[in-house]
Amino acid sequence: VTALGLELELDAPAAVAAPRRLTMTSGGTFLVLLAAATAIPWLGLPLMAGQTGVGAQSKTALLFLGSGFHVAASYAVYLHRDLRPLLRAGRVRYFVVPVLLVAGGAVFMMATSGAVTATAVVAYFIWQTHHYTKQNIGVFAFATRARRTLGPSLLERSAITTAGFAGVIGMITIITPYQSTPFASAAMYAHNVAVLVFLAAGGLLFACVPRALLAGDPVRFAFLIGGVLFYLPTFVYRDPFPAVASYAIAHGCQYLVFMGYVAGAERRLRMLAATGAVALVGGLALWHTGSLHGTVGRLASGAALGVVMAHFVIDAGVWRLSEPFQREFMSTRFRFLRPTP
Amino acid sequence: VRGREQFPAWVGPRPRTPNQVAAAVTALAVIGVAAWSARPLDGRVVQRLTTGADEMPLLAPMQVPVLYEGFGEVESWGRWTIDDVAAVTFGRPLPEQLAVVVRAHAYGPNVGRPVLLCLGGECQPVSFGPSPTDAQVSFGSNSSRARRLEIHVPEPTAPGDHDPRRLGLLIESIEVRAA
């Protein structure tokens, strides 16, 4: 399976066992938290659009948690003593590339304008949205392990990935400056293509029903449906806020659940507090870049994009559970990843 | 239990990764949209330029895409033209004989002055008042099936230092109707 963008081959249990009840040991709490982290922004943000007072404050809090706070939280991996061998072994991925991305992003935004900047921004959003899809596959994989049921099949992963392609393509005409790129005359059809791809993803989901019946676990199937319908707001709303922010913030909140488990396992309150501090300070810094203008603003926004792109790169390494080191590390944090005795 | 075996033989070469499946599906969708976009428009198409006008696009999956050039951001009451020439490029060829209805109002010195609507080399004059009005023109010889409708604004004017945009028309909607 692919977990958080990470390749992990997991064979399904030899025999299909009845799913366990939701308990701490089966990862039940984890799944409940994941479901809440997904559903609250996914359903709530469209309702909060244009609200004032408490609604607006809740919206701002969700936006902060799901955007800068979650990106900054990923940098807490540098604080984990247990991860230092991995960081040392992957100096290029964990040190060189992040520095290059941050510095390069700042310089790029300073040095370019017009169609070049617009094209780069479109590419950035494509990468970002694809990053969400990889996590969606990871979420489903973790759910199947937590439920001790059938692992994800190629068909099921294909359904989530195809929906992800639809999300990526559909997002282009909603939030990117595609009209300022040299590809505008082709990109204008993106929504039409995305609708067809999303419908095909629905067809693949339907084809997954026999396996869902074989697994006999509604919770497992619910997580599969959630993974496929993740980008549905893109096809329901044209206003960028509910159409894209709803699932983007859901992605960020899901990630915080993952990082909370990584930091807080085995009552490591000190690490949990350190992760929270990194996320808060880094998140506020990223949030602040949006209010800067002029040369400083361009420099800061480029660096901020670099920080987010480095987050994609760091994640793809730390969560690569096909690697023995990462698998062993994560199994100490997520006990349900361990093989059944 | 490997999912790879779940794809029936008629699918063709067995996909090995989810990305291959998604890429194949996307390629098919691109081919379908390309074929659809080559067919000339028939009937009636209304493009609204106001905020929220395109809500619930899932209900109209094959709505004609449109590319705007020389326009400002979408506002709740429409989009301003902000250049000498504003252009609307439709995602499908326009009919050979068609009527175009533009609902707009003009800004400042553009009120009451001739605005040229051009399609495939043929231009027709219209004019707009200070409040929203409908202007209709007919094109009878779009044999090249042009897609690009140009709006030539007589005198784009910036309201002042507080708004440097060169405003001409505030357009609410553009309707294309096969004659």
Image (cartoon, coloured by chain):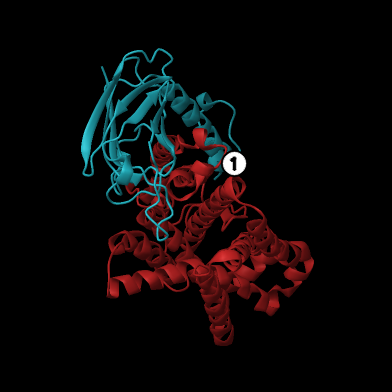
Q: Residue placed at 36% from the left, 13% from the top?
A: B141
Locate residue B55, reporting x and y percent: 29, 46
- Picture layout, residue A265 above or below residue A162: below
Locate residue A206, reporting x and y percent: 38, 40
- Picture layout, residue A148 above or below residue A270: above
Q: Chain of mark 1?
A: B
- Picture layout, residue A253 above or below residue B151: below
Dividing the picture into quadrants, the one containing residue B57 is: top left
Locate residue A112, reporting x and y percent: 64, 52
What is the three-letter code of the residue carrying label 1? Thr
Is residue A165 visible in the rendered structure shown here? no
Q: Disc 1 on helix, strand or loop? A: loop
Is residue A17 visible in the rendered structure shown here? yes
Identify the image quadrant of the C terminus of chain A: bottom right
Q: Residue placed at 44% from the left, 28% from the top?
A: B33
Q: Colour of chain A?
A: red
- Picture layout, residue B156 above or below residue B62: below
Q: Residue placed at 31% from the left, 46% from the top?
A: B108
The one of B107 and A39 positioned closer to us in this rendering: B107
Residue B122 as seen in the image, left or right of residue A314: left
Chain represented in cyan? B
The one of B174 and B18 positioned closer to us in this rendering: B174
| Neighbour tally class for label 1: few under 14, some 14-19, many 20 plus, Cα within 10 Å | some
The residue that mark 1 highlights is: B17
